[in-house]
Image: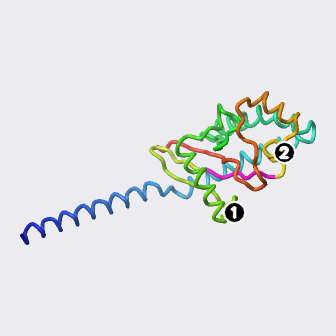
Amino acid sequence: MQKILFSRAVGAITVSAGLLMLSACQSRHNDPAPELVAKGQAISEQFVATLQPTLQAAMQTGGPVNAIQVCAVEAPRIAADLSASSGWTVNRVSLRARNQRSAVPDSWEAEVLADFDRRQLAGEPVGQLNTAEIVGDEFRYMQAQAAGALCLTCHGADISADVQAALDQHYPQDMATGYLAGQIRGAISVRTALD
């Protein structure tokens, strides 16, 4: 009887040790190198720094209807140009996507976006809401984006008839309205394959 109990105890210890080793390996695997995190952050910031003045200029020259048209063309172009120049994949995603061709999150992005919402509700500032992780053979980084004053013209709850008509024309399946100032509207998502 003692031999059986001893054998079970050794087995349990062996299984526990194996699980600890596995969890340590997984945690190291998901602890990306700081240079990858910095690069992901820089690409995300570059996307925003390019798109925001483009939209502001479009608003100033032709109002929100013009900005919607510019956003429909320029945001994907900026993402494509940045992807080509950096070698990373750059995209905007949202749980309430406006562009159904490019802004619908994959399962990992959807989980991160839901986590961003939880973290914001817990009081974490949107500017600090980011995630960096190794997923399979890719490094992935996401930075939350809040609905600012400029965004609410086309993403808010009180949208004019002409803006709604432009949204219907460019984004017939739009789900990205009804936001409040400061609410997470989506995220910049960047990724690169690991060698």
At x 78%, y 30%, the residue is 168
Give the x, y percent position of residue 91.
65, 40
Q: Is residue 118 something one can see in this rendering? A: yes
Question: Which residue position holds label 2?
Answer: 158
Q: Report the front residue among 19 and 97.
A: 97
Q: Report the front residue among 135 and 165.
A: 165
82 up-or-down from 172: above or below: below
Find the residue positioned furthest to the right. 61
At x 79%, y 52%, the residue is 148
At x 64%, y 42%, the residue is 93
Find the residue positioned furthest to the bottom. 2
Which of label 2 and label 1 is nearer to you?
2
Question: Which residue position holds label 1?
Answer: 125
- Residue interval drawn in magenta: 142-148
Q: Residues within 10 Å of mark 1 (few under 14, many from 20)?
A: some
Amino acid marked by disc 1: Pro
| Distance of label 2 from label 1 (alpha carbons) | 25 Å
Q: Report the front residue among 153 and 20.
A: 153
Circle 1: element type:
loop
Total labels: the figure holds 2
Q: Residue 173, labelled with which disc?
A: none
9 up-or-down from 91: above or below: below
In reply to whether residue 147 is colored magenta, the answer given is yes
Q: Is residue 58 something one can see in this rendering? A: no
In reply to whether residue 25 is colored magenta, the answer given is no
Q: Quadrant of residue 115?
A: bottom right
Give the x, y percent position of residue 13.
23, 66
Q: Horizontal placement of 193 versus 127: left or right?
A: left
